[in-house]
Image (cartoon, rainbow, N blue to C red):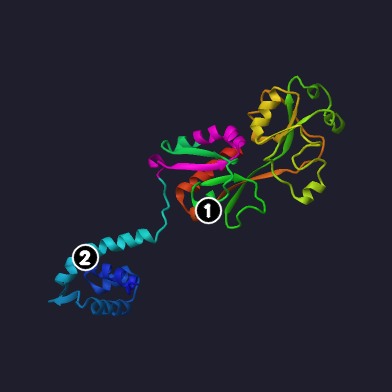
Amino acid sequence: MLKIDLNLLVVLNALLTECNITRAAQKQNLSVSAMSRAVNRLRISLNDPILVKSGRNMVLTPYALGIRAQVVQLVHQLDQVFTLPNQLDLQSLTRLFTLRASAGFAENYGAALLAFMREQAPNSTLRIISKEIKQGKLLKQGEIDAEISVISNKTEPDMKSRFLFSDRLIGAVQLTHPLADQPITFDNLTTFDFIGVHRQPEFTAEQLDDCACSAIGLIKPPILTVTGFSTALAVVQDSQLIAIVPERFTHNLRKPLFSFVLPYKVPSINISLLWHPRMNNDLAHKWFRECILHVCQEQ
């Protein structure tokens, strides 16, 4: 371990620049006596007087002249190391950002997010990987930048998070379905068949007690189960099945369908953005997070 007082390096830089103990003290906001003590320590550490009298003036020794440029550079580098950057040049940013999110987020927000990013940082790129890839440690391992998720007891407790929006479950059927032309009641729903989505969020016991449906938002067991909302809606377009899906996550996908509010109480879904603490102060990452927030609030 280096036994170096970095404060002495800063003092040395001031002394080599000003060639005068009094002016060097003023530059460092020190008293002349404190600067003199620091200079004495430098002389002992370097085994060189550094600054000596020459008539009425003070001059640097050959050794001090030889190291002046190097010391100036070292102090500048130290200042950069211990100062967090406060500006980001988006025009020259060429970073690939990786976001883990459900297919519904990619289909409904992906294009808008990329357009908003490229408008500010023309050379930035975006990759969205599916939540169906069951690798919960990607954030911790640094393989992704952020994740769109519902915070639960399975969420890593040390992750940073930011609330994005609340979503609710609604029903969707094709336009020729009988429900499109009749009142949506609990009894009417029970006469038709459902498609289930296995990956929908699990509700807590308290929520289930206050919910008139099963954990996947259905009032009776589905006759077909798939693994994604987009798949469920694609099947609904060619069948007489009812899909229960998040409203905001499926906005674009439901345009050719008939959508309706459920006639029973269903817990809302709080969607959040997660990222690892090591990326918290990274300027480019901060910008990326703000882009996601902006797009989610706009739509």
Query: Residue reaching furthest right?
Result: 187
Residue that carries the numbered disc 2 in the rendered image = 68
Residue pictured at 46% horizontal, 51% vertical = 282
Q: Secondary structure at mark 1?
A: helix
Compared across the picture, whether 251 is left or right of 111 comes to right
- Disc 2: CA contacts within 10 A as few (<14), some (14-19) or many (>=20): some
Q: Nearer the viewer, residue 280 or 80?
A: 280
Residue at the farthest top position: 176
Q: Residue at x 53, y 45 (%)?
A: 289
Residue matched to label 1 = 140
Place residue 124 in its image quadrant. Answer: top left
Q: Image quadrant of residue 51?
A: bottom left
User: Going 20% across and 74% down the picture, which residue do you hit?
Assistant: 50
Image height of 21 relative to 126, above or below:
below
Seen in the picture, residue 272 relative to 187 is either above or below; the reply is below
State the image coordinates of residue 28 (x, y, percent, origin top left).
33, 69
| Circle 1 Cα neighbour tier, 10 Å, few/some/many (<14 / 14–19 / ≥20) | some
Q: Is residue 29 above or below residue 175?
A: below
> Along the horizontal axis of the image, is 193 left or right of 51?
right
Which span is picked out in magenta? 89-115
Q: Amino acid at mark 1?
A: Lys
> Which image quarter is the N terminus in?
bottom left
